Amino acid sequence: MYNKLLVAGLASGTLMFTHAHAQQADTGEADVLEKLGSFQSTGTTEFTVIDQNTSSADAIRRTLERITLPEGFSIDLYALVPDARHMAVGSQGVAVFVGTRKTEVWVVTDRDKDRVADEVKNFAPSLVKAIPNGPCFSPDGVLYIAEQNRVLAYPAAEFFYESPDVVAVPVIAGGELIPEEHVSYNHTARVCDVGPDGKLYISLGQPYNVPPKELREVFDEHGIGGIIRVDPDGNNREVYTRGIRNSVGHDFHPATGELWFTDNQVDGMGDDIPPGEINRQTEMGQNFGFPWYGGGDVRTNEYMDEEVPEDVLFPVVETVAHAADLGMMFYTGNMFPAAYRGGIFSAQHGSWNRTEPIGARVMFTPVDAEGNVTGDTVPFAEGWLDENGEYLGRPVDVAQLRDGSLLVSDDLAGAIYRISYREPAANE
């Protein structure tokens, strides 16, 4: 119904906003949204365009020479994208939208289809954004962007992004994603996805290493430390996933439609515990154990004396401790060999408080058509952590282009890489 409303609004030349949305937003920002919804200019005329031919590009290409991949795979610089975080590939195959933990969303265009970006510029510069980390597309081309405390929908974003003014519709108004008193600088990188049911799923990391007991009830009520889902117009909000610490990557299994997600474990318990997680959810409301468990079956010190709920589910994959598993996706393309199809590619951002750093790589987990993990999670692309323990890059997210190649974002280098495959010749 929401998409029909958007189409009707586009056809008539106006989009209506509820009185409540306008009242709850900042007055200046509400005026901008109202103008954009009525196809009125805000007066913004300038873009920030990122030069793709710089010494930084040359340095990153040198770093990529040290990245190891399975035979037949190669990695290349796709685009320079400052602070590149989570990515959403447009349904028309025109552009890739890239979130950041700062104030910009970047739109990356490969006009000549040589699999190298021709243009990178900021998206919707007339709108002020706050930690717009999580872009995602619906199958019919609506772009959603989950910010620190707001979610906006951009209908037909792939067709409007050439203008500084872009139609934007509040899905969850500013200040309503979580209560303002719980807005934090920590764990605010939201991600979103549209499920097979057409609903919008949004992760809400909780702001503490381990939350105090007196906040557990209010966090549970709002889905902080969980994943919520809403209708495309923001109605019928419900907490879909409970008992997670800070999930910054999720996807739906292409055959079963079940939600899978990564989760970041508790810090400060030692180098080797607790493990990171990849989780499989089979029905609404399941509990994945946090804060009683800090990762896997490792109990947190803060909740050690509490009785654990009987319905806790443990991860289907435990990953190495403190590697910071972030973005993940099921591979559905045809470019890579059959062994990779249906499996999970996931990005490990790398540790920040481990004695010996670990991570900064792309991992692969084989999964079958029934949703069973059929083998170990193993490194697929690595080499951004050098022999001195210095990070040369920090992968954040993975996304699939229409040709079946894999994009990898890196917020340290400020880049997106493209991994492709070519069958090795018999004499190679």
Image (tube, helix red, strand yellow):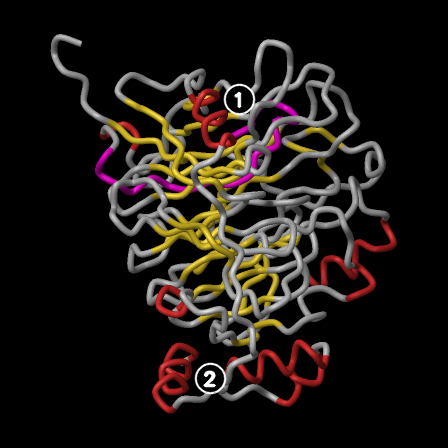
Helix, strand or loop under label 2: loop
Q: Is residue 78 left or right of residue 50?
A: left
Q: Which one is nearer the viewer's eye here, 122 or 270?
A: 122
Q: Which residues are magenta?
A: 317-335
Residue 31: within the magenta?
Answer: no
Q: Which one is nearer the viewer's eye here, 169 or 284?
A: 169
Total number of numbered labels?
A: 2
User: Residue visible at 79% across and 54% down?
Assistant: 216
- Name the spot of residue 75 as percent of width and height, x first: 36, 27
Helix, strand or loop under label 1: loop
User: Residue visible at 58% across and 32% down?
Assistant: 349
User: Which quarter of the rendering shows the N terminus?
Assistant: bottom left
User: Which quarter of the rendering shows the C terminus?
Assistant: top left
User: Residue visible at 68% across and 71% down?
Assistant: 174
User: Residue visible at 49% across and 73% down?
Assistant: 165
Name the outermost residue toward the left.
Answer: 426
Residue 416 against residue 33 in the figure, above or below: above
Residue 180 against residue 63 in the figure, above or below: below
Disc 1: which residue: 384
The amino acid sitting under disc 1 is Trp
- Name the spot of residue 194 as percent of width and height, x first: 44, 60
Which mark is first along the chain, 1 or 2? 2
**Figure quadrant of residue 71:** top left
Disc 2: which residue: 39
Looking at the rendered image, the disc whose residue lies closer to the viewer, 2 or 1, is 2
Q: Is residue 350 left or right of residue 352?
A: left
In three-dimensional space, the C-alpha distance between marks 2 and 1, rounded to whole angstroms, equals: 45 Å
Residue 334: within the magenta?
Answer: yes
Q: Which one is nearer the viewer's eye here, 65 or 155?
A: 65
Count residues near mark 2 (Cα–Cα under 10 Å), then give few for <14, some for 14-19, many for 20+.
some
- Name the spot of residue 392 as percent of width and height, x first: 57, 23
